Image: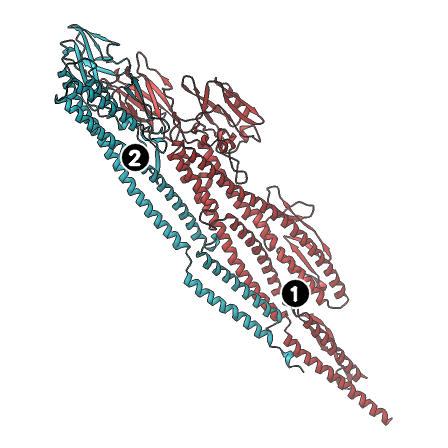
Chain colours: A red, B cyan
Amino acid sequence: MSDYSIGISGLNAAEQALDVIGNNIANSATEGYHRQRIELSPNSSLRQGSLLFGTGVNVDGVARVIDNLLEQEILRQYSSLGQVDRELVTLQSLESVLGEFSSEDSGLNAAIDNFFNSLQDLSTNPTDGVWQNQVVSDAEVLAGQFRTLGEYLTTLETEIQLEVENTVDSINSLTSQIAELNEQIQRVEVGGGTASSLRDQRDKLISDVAALISVETQSRDYGVVDVIIAGIPVVMGAATIELEAGLDSSGQMGISVKGEANYTTNISGGAVGGLLAMKNDLVSDIHDDLDSLAAAIIQRINQLHVQGVGSSGSFRELTGWKMLSEDVADFGSSVGDGSIYVRLTDTSTGEATRHEITIDASSDSLASIAAAFDAITGLNAAVVNSKLSITADAGYEFDFLPAVLSAPTASTLTGSPPTISVSGIYDGTANDTFTFTVSGTGSVGNGTLQLVVTDSSSNTAATLNVGSGYEAGETLEIGNGIKIALTTGSLNDGETFEVEAFADTDTSGVLASVGINTFFSGNGADDMAVCSAISSAPSRVAACLGADMTDNANALRLAGVQDEALSSLGSLTCGEFYRQLVANVGLDVSTRDLEQGNIEMIVQNLESRRDDISGVDINEEAAELLIYEQMFQAMAKYISTIQTSMESLMEIL
Amino acid sequence: MGGTVNSIYNNLSFALNLQTDTLFRLQEQASTGSRINRASDDPSAAYRVLGLNSQVRTLESYADNIERTLSTLEISLTVIGEMISALADAKVAVSQITSGIYGEDGRATAAEGINDTLEQMVSLANTQHLNEYLFGGGNTGSAPYSVVRTDGKITSVAYQGSYENREVEVAAGVRSSAFYIGDEIFCSNDRSELVFVGDTGAQAGTGTSSVRGDTWLTVTGSEGNYSLSIDDGLTTVSTDGTDTNLAVTDSRTGQVLYVDTTTITAAGVDLVRAPGTYDVFETLIYVRDILSNEKGLSDTQVEELCSSSMESLEEIRDYLTEKSVSVGSKIGFLEVLANSIEDMKFVTEDETMMLEEADIAQIAIDIAREEILYEMSLAVAGSLMSMSLLDFIG
């Protein structure tokens, strides 16, 4: 009765083929579905005498039409696309927040320019309240812009951190599902079945994971696939290892086996790769750059500001900001060994004296500095709540002006020497002591009397005629901004007097670091602000450096910071550094935009190729439907014919 | 195999996304007129545009500084011009006295006129512009000149301003001051040999004296025992007539006059002129006092002194004229600089515009092309979707 068997096998095969076709058409729009094909083979033959006869058709199974190499490449590209997508979205949002080009005077670039230009304006009218207010107002806008950007970046970093944690949770969930499917597939295929649909479901999950993070897969027997992430075998058959996200000891974010805290930070691919690149490199670098820029402006402006005074003049009291540590060694890299030169003025006589406080950065503390100030007659100082506070006694005022004192600081002149008046604003770049040595003996205005001026390196700075031709009282310029004038009197050959010239009255950097007479407060973009003492009293904007406190020398120095190439900014000016930062962000966005387009194109091509191989073409399925329909009809007819033949035979009997 | 439902949909979706993105960009450029709306549109051009914008702001700041400086200098020039004019009038008045046209009453009237001129000069020297004193050097907040009056009349004028210039930046690396140091404007500083007018025979010593303008040297005593004073006798210096360089000091000012006493032949009062050291105020005070004849000099002496004071007035007027030319030159320089800065600003803005400006014609063409591509994508997808074997299965 092999004829019946042949017919039944054919009917079965055609029926199952029609099932597969129906399933294909039903899943023609299902994402991740791979076209299935029924696999048929002839049944074993029967020997009848010397002849072999077929026994029908056998259904070997239902197989997925899949190109594994292509699938692997698609997974890899999904990971790349996931990373670039995430980076691009973040960078585009950052670029928008920078706000350049949204309007002519928006953005930090304009704020930096406006601040320095208002200092230029102040230099034209250093005592005018309108310009002082303008400087404070523009400084507040500048600080506000820095804070807005800094806070945005901080929030962004926090959000990225949370997103990585959430994404890792999603990965854990997906790998758990993959492991479950592995188990089901193995169970089916160990029993000789084929689990094409389960494989499709699992492969779809693997591709979902690949969009989140770069994965490697390893196929094993019975359709099982292991999944490896960052060298960690997160799926091994039916077993899983959970991951967690966290920060390593250097603050870099990474992924580790849950509970082990051994974070791998150099992960690429997928949304996690993008997020980690953002957190550890791109956003973090931009934040660092912005902080560096803010810190450079704060530090340089403060360094110059502490030395000057505003139109309100010298101080009766100054209080710094609260220090986290009172040890000078902890004050930061801008503080080192050096000296603070405080100028104390007796308001009843107008006499000014200068006092040096030596700073040893390795051993001094806020308390020892306060003690040094306190030891100066006319000054009181203390540390209150980790803040340095300096107050002047009644009848005294103090400041840190570099202005030369009106008389020489040391002298060996004897007899009836002239009264020597010193004035001017030193324009040198380093503190120096100029020694004036008398050449010749005689009265001022007579003979060949000269003063030879040498600096502390014994280089001759000038030779001044104070003999015949010099009119007593006449002002003589040394050539570095310092001027002297001698009244009548006698000078003796070889006698000397000295003038101390200051370019910097705080070579230690302590004053700017502890907030004494500073303009800005804060350490970076997030906390930059105009000091409240300046905001509430713009007349304290230190535009002056001269002893008469009416000049604009400090306003010019402060405005000049705009054109200074600062070493902390890689020898760029503030504006150049920021513009480079903006251009770099633009370049990053542009590069990733291009990269995204390229990867999308590659993915599109690969998916098209996959559709060519594994996709369901309704027309092709319809054609196959006709074939198997006809096969079914033919087999039914065949059985009917056999039946008729058998009936004819039975009738003979 | 090709043309699966998914692949047709994916291709369509991909193409439409690309075309929509392109259309969005084109629409943005068309609506803003700018091809750079964010740094990523053209990073290198964006860097340049930001730099050029900063440059424009800096140039505007320089232009503002120049404008303010020019405004101040022009007022200063006007003030100096008025002073020159007033000095010319004073000189005419003194020359009429010198010519002997007027007697004592006439001289008194002329003295009143000179006193008025002096008051005017002090007022002009203390001129303010936008609440800033023009001639106080770096100190523009307080009046640079103060006066001491006796019986209502000015007897001395002192400069109290700053001796420091207040320079502002008017171009990169170029600084200019708007406010002059009064002591340098109203007081000449080109000392030459002293001139002794009188009968004592005294002459200048070898030392460089510090007396300025006109000084009265009083010689008392007799040969071999003279006493010399330049502070109206408040302090005297004795000499036996053998000192060739005797320092005579004014106890009020500390100024010193070096006298060669060997040529003194008689007691008396000499007028010691220090050419090249005259200042506007002291000269006018001196002329007024001569005309008032408070020392009780003879008419001849008064006329002689008036004649010599003409030279002082002339010197001061010439000095002020020289300064006004200097201020005028500075104004001219700043006007040229202002024009240069305006030109630079124009060129910079033009360059910015060239970098930023969108090509509207090109945008219109691109939009039309993208529209056609968009429609074609839809049409092709529709056509592919409509063809099916199923239609032919009966």
Q: Nearer the viewer, residue A636 or A483?
A: A483
Residue closest to the far front: B105
Q: Quadrant of the N terminus of chain B?
A: bottom right
Q: Is residue A186 left or right of residue B172?
A: right
Residue A444 screen position, x and y as percent: 26, 17
- To which quarter of the image does residue B227 belong? top left
Q: Quadrant of residue A427?
A: top left
Q: Chain of mark 1?
A: A
- Which amino acid, mark 2? Ile
Tell me the residue that label 1 is attached to: A32
The kind of residue on which mark 1 rests is: Gly
Give residue B93's position: percent from left, percent from top.
18, 25
Residue at (61% x, 45% y) in the render:
A158
Q: Is residue A116 above or below residue A227?
A: above
Q: Where in the figure is residue A627, as x and y percent of width and height?
A: 68, 81
Say if residue A363 shows up in the picture.
Answer: no
Numbered disc total: 2
